[in-house]
Image (cartoon, grey):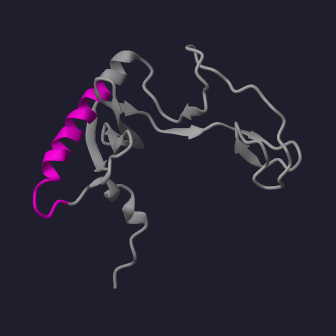
Amino acid sequence: MDITEVRIKLIDDPSERLLAFCSITLAGAFVVRDLKVIVGPSGPFLAMPSRKLSSHCPGCGFKNALRAMYCNQCGRKQPEMPVPRDGDGRPRLYADIAHPINASARELIQKRVVSEYEAELVRAKQPGYVSRYDEIGDEDHRPPRA
């Protein structure tokens, strides 16, 4: 796997477990955004981009979080549904959007991202530091030049 670029956005106040957001570019052709560098039991850990799992209101069809007691659209009480569980029995409230298929791919990505995260911490201490994270895709959102 050819990881051609890693961009890191450090979190200003890492009072929680989240240390940084990151994006990786694969083979100079495919970008995966919103990976998270979080505090793990043995140092920084990489969490893949994910979305909250949801269910639909039986009354209006609106999407609500799995644990919602009432619909956020119509206010109807939601039926109690069992929350799916992972292999360890923990509630599964999120689903990965993109993820490595095997442990060796995960290790390769995590090793590269953690290395870049540590290098970004050093760069952030330099005068005039600016994160490059937000540059990807910004060409679609920049105001037109005069």
- Name the quadrant of the C terminus: bottom left
The residue drawn where x is 24% and y is 31% is: 112
Q: In the image as oriented, which residue stretches furthest toward the left? A: 126
Q: Percent position (x, y) of residue 4?
A: 26, 39
User: Is 27 situated left or right of 121 in this image?
Assistant: right
Q: Nearer the viewer, residue 80 or 37?
A: 80
Residue 79, visible in the rendered structure = yes
By secondary structure, the bulk of the magenta-drawn segment is best described as helix
What segment carries the magenta color? 108-129
Image quadrant assignment for residue 113? top left
The residue drawn where x is 39% and y is 57% is: 137
Q: Nearer the viewer, residue 26 or 69?
A: 69
Q: In the image as oriented, which residue stretches furthest toward the right? A: 59
Q: Percent position (x, y) of residue 3?
A: 28, 34
Q: In the image as oriented, which residue stretches furthest toward the top? A: 87
User: Is 18 situated left or right of 74 in this image?
Assistant: left
* 120 in magenta: yes
Q: Percent position (x, y) of residue 26?
A: 33, 37
Instruction: Report the label total.
Output: 0
The residue drawn where x is 38% and y is 39% is: 17
